[in-house]
Image (spheres, rainbow, N blue to C red):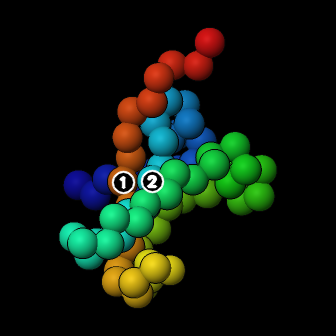
Amino acid sequence: MASKPWTLGAIRAMNLQLEAACAEPGCGWSSAYDLDKMIAEFGADCELPTEAGGLACGRCGAPVDFGLVAVKKRA
């Protein structure tokens, strides 16, 4: 059974943060995405791609990995 792709709205509803990091161990570049801004631009139903789609690190050119992390509950 295939799982459904993550949507921007589901990530926000579960109080998660979407982050990206360079896959090159020595680089250290990472970034957290602004979900509210992404939802305003693409919509809450926008699905995350199942693959990075060839995105490259702006610092060293290596592939970029994406991940979800738990964040502190909003007041």
Residue 45 image point, x, y percent: 63, 51
Dots 2, 1 in contact, CB < 8 A: yes
Q: How crowded is mark 1: few (under 14 residues within 10 Å), some or many (20 or more)?
A: few
Residue drawn at (62%, 46%) of the image: 35
Q: How crowded is mark 2: few (under 14 residues within 10 Å), some or many (20 or more)?
A: some
Residue that protrudes farthest toward the top in the picture: 75
Element type at mark 2: strand
Residue that protrudes farthest toward the right in the picture: 40
Q: In which quarter of the image is the C terminus?
A: top right
Residue drawn at (32%, 72%) of the image: 27
**Viewer-closest of 35 and 1:** 35
Residue 42 image point, x, y percent: 71, 59
Residue 47 image point, x, y percent: 54, 59
Q: What residue type is labelled 1?
A: Gly
- Horizontal side of 26 relative to 67 (left or right) equals left
Q: Name the residue under label 1.
A: 67
Residue 44 visible to an observer of this rendering: no
Residue drawn at (43%, 60%) of the image: 30
Q: Name the residue under label 2.
A: 19
- Horizontal side of 51 relative to 1 (left or right) equals right
Q: Which of marks 2 and 1 is nearer the N terminus?
A: 2
